[in-house]
């Protein structure tokens, strides 16, 4: 059974809301378009440890921390209480990032597999999201085009259990001010510049541990 007593010597991560849908009519963005959007969401002279145009509490900036022995390098651990995500590295260290998690009872702890990942994905809300908040989500029932205002932001990791897509994601957010809070419809949110840094280091197939809130 998952407990919050984990593996990390410092704090941990969090969870947010939307999903990714099929490619929309305009088709996937080109490499040039993706590069332009990446530049748009990355602060000038970006330094992960110090750049903070979003006004985050300093503890939510990327930080390398110590971990206990025995954690699998490459795995992700989300501490929903402290609002941290850890990416386990070599030598009993991890990179720690601030996150936002699902509000109310929408956060879903568990053990998941990264079944796929995507750069600048499109997004479609689930039927449950539309039924729960039609004023917010119904207009996107046919999907939202990729881009800096897309609910999944610049990057997304898709959480699976067995061979089933859970429709939970760890993803970038166009609402960086939500980091450190319970704000989403269930997914784990990250600052787009932060998840862009993390993206290439997370392999499809690794485990994501989401601890109870």
Image (cartoon, grey):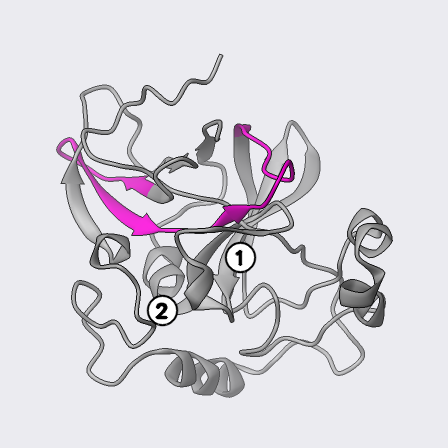
Q: Is residue 192 above or below residue 34?
A: above
Residue 59 is marked as: none
Residue located beneath label 1 in the image: 156
Secondary structure under badge 1? strand
Q: Where does residue 87 sit, x and y in percent of width and height? A: 31, 42
Towards the viewer: 186 or 71: 186
Q: Residue at x 43, y 37 (%)?
A: 80
Question: Can you tell which quarter of the image residue 105 is in?
Answer: top right
Q: Where does residue 47 sit, x and y in percent of width and height? A: 18, 71
Q: Is residue 162 above or below residue 197?
A: above
Question: For residue 73: magenta?
Answer: no
Q: Where does residue 67 sit, x and y in percent of width and height? A: 19, 30
Determine whether, in the image, residue 89 is placed left or right of residue 115: left
Dot 1: within a 10 Å radius of its alpha carbon, few (fewer than 14), some, or many (20 or more) residues? many
Secondary structure under badge 2? helix
Dot 2: within a 10 Å radius of its alpha carbon, few (fewer than 14), some, or many (20 or more) residues? many
- Mark-to-mark CA distance, 2 and 1: 12 Å
Mark nearer the N terminus (2 vs 1):
1
Question: Can you tell which quarter of the image residue 74 is in?
Answer: top left
Determine whether, in the image, residue 193 is placed left or right of residue 59: right
Question: For residue 105: magenta?
Answer: yes
Q: Residue at x 77, y 74 (%)?
A: 24
Towards the viewer: 187 or 181: 181
Look at the image and give the residue range highlighted in magenta: 86-111
Q: Residue furthest top?
A: 1
Q: Is residue 109 above or below residue 23?
A: above
Question: How many dots with numbers?
Answer: 2
Q: Where does residue 138 sit, x and y in percent of width and height? A: 84, 66
Residue located beneath label 2 in the image: 193
């Amino acid at each position: 059974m998952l407990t919050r007593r984990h593996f990390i010597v410092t704090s941990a991560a969090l969870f947010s809301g939307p999903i990714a849908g099929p490619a929309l009519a305009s088709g996937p963005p080109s490499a040039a378009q993706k590069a332009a959007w990446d530049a748009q969401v990355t602060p000038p002279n970006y330094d992960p440890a110090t750049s903070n145009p979003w006004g985050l509490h300093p503890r939510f900036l990327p930080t390398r921390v110590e971990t206990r022995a025995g954690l699998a390098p490459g795995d992700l651990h989300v501490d929903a209480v402290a609002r941290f995500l850890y990416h386990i590295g070599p030598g009993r260290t991890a990179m720690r990032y601030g996150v936002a998690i699902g509000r109310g009872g929408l956060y879903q702890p568990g053990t998941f597999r990264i079944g796929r990942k995507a750069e600048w994905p499109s997004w479609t809300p689930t039927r449950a999201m539309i039924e729960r908040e039609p004023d917010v989500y119904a207009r996107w029932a046919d999907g939202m085009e990729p881009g800096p205002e897309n609910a999944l932001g610049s990057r997304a990791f898709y959480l699976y259990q067995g061979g089933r897509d859970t429709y939970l994601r760890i993803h970038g957010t166009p609402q960086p001010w939500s980091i450190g809070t319970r704000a989403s419809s269930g997914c784990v949110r990250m600052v787009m510049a932060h998840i862009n840094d993390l993206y290439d280091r997370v392999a499809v197939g690794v485990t994501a541990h989401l601890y109870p809130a």
